[in-house]
Image (tube, rainbow, N blue to C red):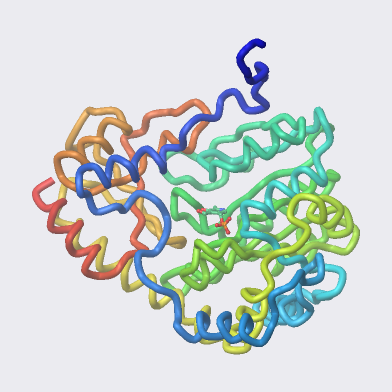
Amino acid sequence: MSSPSTPPITSRLPQVGTTIFTVMSALAQEHGAVNLGQGFPDFEGDPTLVDAVAAAMRAGHNQYPPMTGIPALREAIARKITTLYGLPCDPVSEVTVTAGATQAIITAVLALVHPGDEVIVLDPCYDSYEPSILLAGGVPVHVALTPGSFRPDFDAIAAALGPRTRAIIINSPHNPSATVWSADDMRRLAELLRPTSTLLISDEVYEHMVYDGAQHQSVARWPELAARALIVSSFGKTYHVTGWKVGYVVAPAALMAEFRKVHQFNVFTVNTPMQHGLAAYMAEAGPYLGLPAYYQRKRDLFRAGLAGSRLRLLPSEGSYFQVVDYSAISSLGELDFCRFLTQERGVAAIPLSAFYPDAREQGLVRFCYAKRDDTLNQALERLQGL
Ligand SMILES: Cc1ncc(COP(=O)(O)O)c(C=O)c1O
């Protein structure tokens, strides 16, 4: 008898390997570095929320919930969307609870993108967009945000829009650049999309992290855009519980009906007790309304600590990221500079090149400041003298 062997396979995603986040986190651990690379808090969420989830489990909310999410949570989400952004939202037909934003995005793409359809992504961008498009048989069309400022380049977007463009994916506040789209940006996007049948996937996971008194320009504030959009958010980011992987999508009923056809077969439902806990916790707006002040203070602490260094700080208008230009210090490539920072200085960061398909070099790296003050202070001490 021949020995057992695994048949050869052709990869659906041949270009995908180990992500930079895994690589840098492993390097950080090996060198005892402060990990400001991967984007997650190193502090706990509110115990009230944890208690609400535990109470839901004890109350017996442990079996499959409805496919679309429990009504109380969908109602809380719809109320929030209407209260904050003014968009009427039907919790029955226009809201679905997802297993985080990443599942929401791939589900939206699989539901709406047909083989050969083009989808515009604005680089640099979150790394799940491209594989999602490729798995749907779509064609990613890469348009760079303006180098230096990372503002949307509407001429370039206009040039990329064509009869095969099924959708465009936008993300504000933006990972990794920490820029925030303005009302004028939204107006220009609406003008560009008006004559087209292009759908909009709006990744708004950092919606509550906008600083200096600016307002988050949710697509939900722009009815013309909302009519063609799937708006995605994540409780993981908002409530400091990234490991819970619970998020949601809001979309007009016709789009949502298609979204749910795919959602039903790639997760079916999202875990029940967390939905009950989140629904109860959402009754209070304080936790998310207080987020800008909470993170702005951390941002300011981190920026003040770096002000004396030769790192040039780009603006951090939103999200919990800070991009720095290190070209006054080193001519190393971005990945090598991150290795140097981790190994020699004991602080891990992420190269911006990791967010571009062509891995372009701009002398920029990204830090995450969603960390305890003592973590940030320790990192700042180690970065002294750069
Ligand atoms: C822009 C962006 N979208 C989506 C996500 C993923 O969110 P979730 O953990 O809810 O899947 C992240 C997480 O880093 C992100 O930065």
Is 361 rendered above or below residue 309? above
- Given the current orientation, which residue lies at the most extreme top position? 2
Frontmost residue, 117 versus 180? 117
What is the quadrant of residue 325 in the picture?
top left
Where's the C terminus, which quadrant? top left
Q: Residue at x 41, y 43 (%)?
A: 21
The spot of residue 69 in percent (x, y) is 76, 70
In the visual, does 310 lie left or right of 162?
left
In the visual, does 216 lie left or right of 67?
left
Frontmost residue, 188 versus 355? 355
Any part of residue 81 in sight: no
The spot of residue 354 in percent (x, y) is 44, 35
What is the quadrant of residue 256 in the picture?
bottom right
Q: Residue at x 75, y 63 (%)?
A: 269
The spot of residue 75 in percent (x, y) is 76, 80
Is 130 rendered above or below residue 64? above
- Given the current orientation, which residue lies at the most extreme left position? 385
Where's the N terminus, which quadrant? top right
Frontmost residue, 253 versus 180? 253
The spot of residue 34 in percent (x, y) is 24, 54
Q: Residue at x 31, y 69 (%)?
A: 298
In the visual, does 306 lie left or right of 125?
left
Any part of residue 150 in sight: yes
**Number of dots carrying numbers:** 0
Q: Residue at x 71, y 78 (%)?
A: 73
Is 97 rendered above or below residue 379? below
Indicate the quadrant of ligand 1 in the picture: bottom right
Frontmost residue, 155 versus 112? 112
- Given the current orientation, which residue lies at the most extreme front position? 1
What is the quadrant of residue 211 in the picture?
bottom left
In the visual, does 200 lie left or right of 185?
right
